[in-house]
Amino acid sequence: MTFDPASLRYDANGLIPAVAQDDATGEVLMMAWMNADAVAMTLATGRVTYWSRSRQAFWIKGETSGHAQALVDLRIDCDRDCLLLRVTQSGPACHTNRRTCFFTAVRDGTEVELMAPEPARP
């Protein structure tokens, strides 16, 4: 069956959540939003492209930071309203310069930071 990005279930703003996961380790790296065009661009280029809600523009991961995501596999959940992107990540995934955006845990009612930012490149 041929895949059509329009067959996905988008929210009222035309967006679908996309969770990026490191293909080698299984680590969840980040969550961002895609629209149908971003899904199509990602599949066509192999470079993960999101939709930036704040800038109202496409955001090719790593285009400015160099911390790119190469698509390995795109998976659709059973309700067709969420995507799992298996990726090869170059450098940190998070804009805070951490490997993953999920670096805060709640333990015994307290927020605990699990990892420090990576050192800046010279």
Image: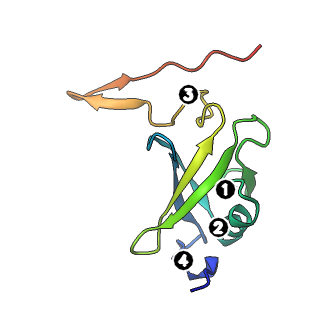
Q: Quadrant of the N terminus?
A: bottom right
Q: Quadrant of the C terminus?
A: top right
* Kind of residue at badge 4: Leu
Which residue is at a point 44% across and 30% down the rendered structure image? 103
Q: Position of residue 118 (x, y in %)?
A: 59, 20
Whether residue 28 sits left or right of residue 3 in the image: it is: left
Front one among 85 and 38: 85
Up-down relation of residue 29 to residue 72 (above or below): above
- Mark before the other along the chain sequence, 2 or 3: 2
In what element is the residue under mark 2? Answer: loop
Q: Which residue is mark 3?
A: 98
Q: Quadrant of residue 48?
A: bottom right
In what element is the residue under mark 1? Answer: strand
Up-down relation of residue 53 to residue 89 (above or below): below
Q: Which residue is mark 1?
A: 50
Disc number for residue 8: 4
Q: Which residue is mark 2?
A: 35
Q: Tell me the CA gap for discs 2 and 1.
A: 8 Å
